[in-house]
Amino acid sequence: MPMMVLTYQITYPQLLKRFRNAVFGKKVFCPYCGYKKPRKISSTKYWCKKCRKRFSLTSCTIFKGSKLPLEKLILLLECFLKGFKVKQTQELVGVSRKAVSHWFQKFRENIPEIEREEFLESDIFVLDDSYFGGKRKENKGRKTPFKTIVLGLLNKSFGKVKVCCVPSLHFKIVASFLNFYLPSKKVKLFSDSFKSYQLAKKWLKLENHTLIDHQKKFKETNPVENVWSVMKRKLREIYHHATRKYMPFYVKELAYRFNTRNNPDDAFSFLRKVSRNQWKLSKIPVPFW
């Protein structure tokens, strides 16, 4: 039995109101057709007059199909955002270890990414790659087998990073990554003198791409090395290790934690960001708030 179980200090109606505002905004609308005046059946269920479908507050969220109470789901999300370990969350929330692992993976898959427009508001970027996971210590650096290759682009002005797990460091893959995330070919870009970076520079015809020789200086690329250090240390602190199959989700989570380190999200702001991304991808005319 757990020694202590967390509970929310606000009442259930207040919790429902905050959850509803985070998912739908000011007014509830039908997630199937976008109708703005559905009929309320109960505290959490609605019926749409237009498409004649029923829905609940959780049926269009990451909590869809869950049998756990809403209070426990919000507490699980809070523990995930605070960086609690699985066993610690199990004892605090009062659910099984399997349930905690399941919901942590669910949250990981739906991590909200930083807006591309916000990331592009800079003129100084740093490019680098790193390797995550694996157990073998014989080979180090880019010759290491059985590890996940991660490309990272750091926005030096705002301290935000974009990461992507890639199958290899072929110069065309690097060039595609840069072509998508760089605002223009005239911005300042720093990287080491790896051969793929040199070929990508020629392929994209980057004007201000500076290749740094690490045998002489590290100052320009040190910020992105710090990002890898923070992400790997956080991975060891919370999860100890991660399998190669799920490593892209862990890398995505670690990048999110780094980008929100100065202004971390609570459960409701996290749900608000996830819901906005979901409504943007949907084809129905939803009223954005």
Image (cartoon, rainbow, N blue to C red):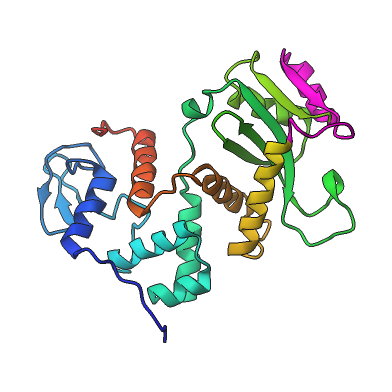
Taking the image as shown, residue 77 lies to the left or right of residue 255, namely left
Residue 136 visible, this angle: yes
Q: Using the image as rendered, state which of residue 85 and residue 280 is in the foreground.
A: 85
* Percent position of residue 197, x then y: 78, 27
* Percent position of residue 133, x then y: 72, 56
**Can residue 79 be found in the magenta stretch?**
no
Q: In this view, which residue lies farthest toward the bottom?
A: 1
Residue 245 visible, this angle: no
Quadrant in the picture for the N terminus? bottom left
Q: Using the image as rendered, state which of residue 196 and residue 226 is in the foreground.
A: 226
* Percent position of residue 92, x then y: 41, 74
Place residue 214 in its image quadrant. top right
Q: How many marks?
A: 0
Taking the image as shown, residue 85 lies to the left or right of residue 17, namely right
Which residue is depicted at the point 12% across and 59% down?
42
* Percent position of residue 192, x then y: 80, 31
Taking the image as shown, residue 251 lies to the left or right of residue 211, namely left
Which residue is depicted at the point 72% across and 15% down?
208
In this rendering, is residue 44 above or below 24? below
**Can residue 220 be found in the magenta stretch?**
yes
Q: Using the image as rendered, state which of residue 228 and residue 144 is in the foreground.
A: 228
Which residue is depicted at the point 70% across and 31% down?
127
Which residue is depicted at the point 69% across and 23% down?
189
In this rendering, is residue 218 above or below 52? above
Place residue 10 in its image quadrant. bottom left
Instruction: Please state the extent of the stretch shown in magenta in the rendering.
Output: 194-221
Taking the image as shown, residue 104 lies to the left or right of residue 25, namely right
Quadrant in the picture for the C terminus? top left
